[in-house]
Amino acid sequence: MATAAVDKRRMILDAAVRVFARQGFHTCRVSDIADEAGVAYGLVYHYFSSKDEILDTLFLERWALMLAAIAEADAAHADPRAKLRAIASFILESYRHDPDLMKVIIVEVTRAANTFGRTHLAQIRDAYGQIAGIVERAQASGAFRTEITPEFAALAFYGAIEQVLTGWIFDEHRLDEAEVRRVTTLIVETICGGVGRGGDRRTSSVASSDSA
Amino acid sequence: MATAAVDKRRMILDAAVRVFARQGFHTCRVSDIADEAGVAYGLVYHYFSSKDEILDTLFLERWALMLAAIAEADAAHADPRAKLRAIASFILESYRHDPDLMKVIIVEVTRAANTFGRTHLAQIRDAYGQIAGIVERAQASGAFRTEITPEFAALAFYGAIEQVLTGWIFDEHRLDEAEVRRVTTLIVETICGGVGRGGDRRTSSVASSDSA
DNA sequence: GTATCCTGACTGACGAGTCAATCAACTGAC
DNA sequence: GTCAGTTGATTGACTCGTCAGTCAGGATAC
């Protein structure tokens, strides 16, 4: 377990991020990853048992940070709006620091949990669940209105963020800190405040238009 | 161009939807599609020049309907909320009628927009643009508030819908008409009204917290 | 009779994963 | 301090299954 050994493993993972982002997981060859990492083909199989395991590792590493960030956002703030802001900010900062990695996570894993292991699906849903919990407690405390289910609010919140990132991903948009702040505000404002005018709220009409 | 010929082409496309949904585009073989369609392998290449072209065709067919539905929703209603409701309803109904097709569109095309033709990307963005246009005009007429940019509102709206569908896709959730109505209401209510309480609106704080 | 539909065996390329061999660092025996 | 022995890192040529796409020919319609 020499330092050099650890470095090579890391180099392969980092190279894989760049290659997956550039060519896509299915389209690229394992030899592309080895070449990008400046490492012999066989070494990839010394550290990973398969091409899939490389993607697995990248996702699990990143998602663990994500879950931790959500838990921390929940713990660090009292105001639910501040909690959501912290989560949105974390995800946008992740993209700012490593757009390739976020591209891989979103394009290859989040949307592809189909063919991939069901394990990832559980992890992803864990994140939604935590966000829903935040909303639920905000409703219980009276800070958020109860017409919208917590699970739905969580999906809309995460969905809005992912859609913004997806838009950026394909034309390799880079952000600065100011834009992260601006977009974070926009996301939280949209989900919490809505796009309609204040007087346009139809709180009572929700139940009536929802028959059966 | 006999009727039977048209039918075979259609049969291949329909079979491809089922196979792509079940196994994923990259994982499945062209022979799987031919088998599913009850047709000889070679016939697939009589009607389509490549495996990619099949997916292309499915996407373009569906997306044309999508764009038409958005245009119609815009034309048929005066109230912007009703317009958004019509669009959300159309997408959810599409899922209700053909979940496999929607799964393929969302999972395989969004994912492939990377390696796939930029044409699709333009088509997808066209839809966002139209939705943004609806929001923009609603703001001009005073129905929607102007703190949230139309482009952003469009992303959040579409993102929320896609996230809900993505959640359903992986556990093959089927809906009835009542649920379509219920979820449509939820989406429109979330995007237009927001999850926060009425008094929680921070209209003026948007500009102040957004430095630079 | 010819144009289009249809068949399925075949091919050629490609790429994931294997493996036998080399190298580098350390270990302990003398 | 050095040398055989051991363990793990590293290499890249090779194997072997897989599959997209071809093609030569048969069936069917008009």
Image: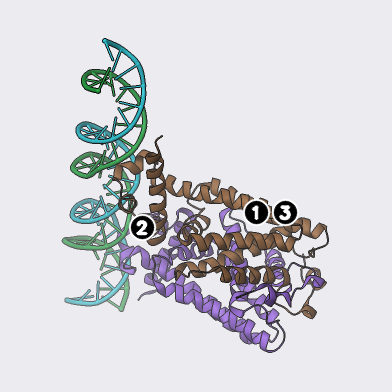
Chain colours: A brown, B purple, C cyan, D green
User: Which kind of residue does numbered mark 3 sit on?
Assistant: Gly
Picture coordinates of residue B41 (x, y %)?
32, 58
Q: Secondary structure at mark 1?
A: helix
User: Which kind of residue does numbered mark 1 sit on?
Assistant: Ile
Disc 1 chain ID: A
Q: Nearer the viewer, residue B78 or A97?
A: A97
Which quadrant of the view contains residue C19? Answer: top left
Q: Residues within 10 Å of mark 1 (few under 14, many from 20)?
A: many
Q: Which residue carries the number 3 mark? A: A133
Q: Which mark is residue A27?
A: 2
Between discs 2 and 1, the one toward the N terminus = 2
Disc 2 chain ID: A
Q: Which mark is residue A70?
A: 1
Q: Nearer the viewer, residue A189 or B44?
A: A189
1 or 3: mark nearer the eye: 1
Quadrant where the C terminus of chain B is found in the figure: bottom right
Which quadrant of the view contains residue D30? Answer: bottom left
Disc 3 chain ID: A
